[in-house]
Image (cartoon, rainbow, N blue to C red):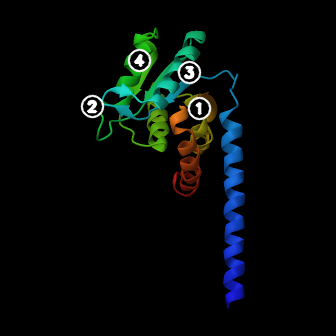
């Protein structure tokens, strides 16, 4: 009996290590690949606010997106994020304010302010696009931090669009925590985000 428990334990440990390496390989690969594809829309995924001020992770997403939007003046953007318990306004409203304050025309920005997760960010944003655009096979560029690109693209594919990534830097203060947390978030997403 001890031999069976030992073998099962060793097998579990090996499988966990292999899954960790595989998933992080996918996270790193996707997070370091900037797409040059022609897309229909940009979606910026929300992240934490401090009151009504973007936290460093969200600020990086916004800076990267602003640069992209300045270079690609024909692209419209959806800012996506609801309001957390300790946030004074919905994330999407703070995101729009940042973009407008930094040179992006207000009429290029579409607001999705109900979502509370990555899955909802994408689901609700795509529902808005279906209402205002209606074309099938939309090509979507998703702006988020490097560690988050793989999971965001995985969810978007499941929701029926062709996703590309616009990776933003990860603030050094949350780098290790972000990658560790993302491993578990990918597993959760594989099981539950349908």
Q: Residues within 10 Å of mark 1 (few under 14, many from 20)?
A: few
Q: Give the spatial CA distance, label 1 vs label 2.
A: 36 Å
User: In the displayed structure, would residue 8 be above or below residue 131?
Assistant: below
Q: Position of residue 121 (x, y in %)?
A: 46, 37
Ranked by sequence position, the earlier of labels 3 and 4 is: 3
The answer to whether residue 133 is seen in the rendering is no
Q: Give the spatial CA distance, label 4 vs label 2.
A: 15 Å
> In the visual, does 163 lie left or right of 94?
right
User: In the displayed structure, would residue 103 be above or below residue 139?
Assistant: above
> In the visual, does 47 lie left or right of 38?
left
Q: Quadrant of the N terminus?
A: bottom right
Residue drawn at x 56%, y 58% is 191
Q: Quadrant of residue 187?
A: bottom right
Q: Position of residue 96 (x, y in %)?
A: 40, 20
The residue at which mark 1 appears reads as 136
Ranked by sequence position, the earlier of labels 4 and 2 is: 2
Q: Are marks 1 and 2 in contact (CB under 8 Å)?
A: no
Q: Quadrant of residue 145?
A: top right
Q: Residues within 10 Å of mark 4 (few under 14, many from 20)?
A: some
Q: Are marks 3 and 2 in contact (CB under 8 Å)?
A: no
The mark found on residue 64 in the picture is 3
The residue at which mark 2 appears reads as 88
């Amino acid at each position: 009996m001890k031999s069976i428990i030992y073998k099962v334990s060793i097998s579990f440990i090996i499988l966990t290590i292999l899954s960790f390496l595989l998933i992080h390989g996918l996270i790193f690969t996707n997070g370091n690949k900037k797409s040059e594809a022609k897309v229909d829309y940009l979606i910026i995924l929300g992240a934490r606010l401090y009151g009504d001020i973007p936290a460093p992770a969200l600020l990086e997403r916004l800076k990267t997106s602003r640069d992209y939007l300045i270079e690609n003046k024909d692209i419209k953007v959806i800012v996506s994020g609801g309001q957390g318990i300790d946030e004074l306004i919905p994330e999407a409203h703070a995101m729009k304010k940042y973009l407008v304050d930094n040179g992006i025309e207000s009429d290029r920005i579409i607001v999705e302010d109900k979502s509370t997760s990555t899955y909802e960010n994408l689901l609700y944003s795509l529902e808005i696009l279906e209402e205002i655009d209606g074309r099938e096979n939309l090509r979507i560029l998703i702006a988020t931090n490097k560690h988050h690109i793989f999971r965001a693209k995985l969810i978007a594919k499941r929701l029926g669009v062709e996703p590309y990534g616009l990776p933003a830097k990860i603030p050094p203060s949350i780098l290790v925590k972000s990658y560790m947390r993302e491993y578990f978030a990918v597993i959760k997403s594989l099981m539950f985000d349908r």
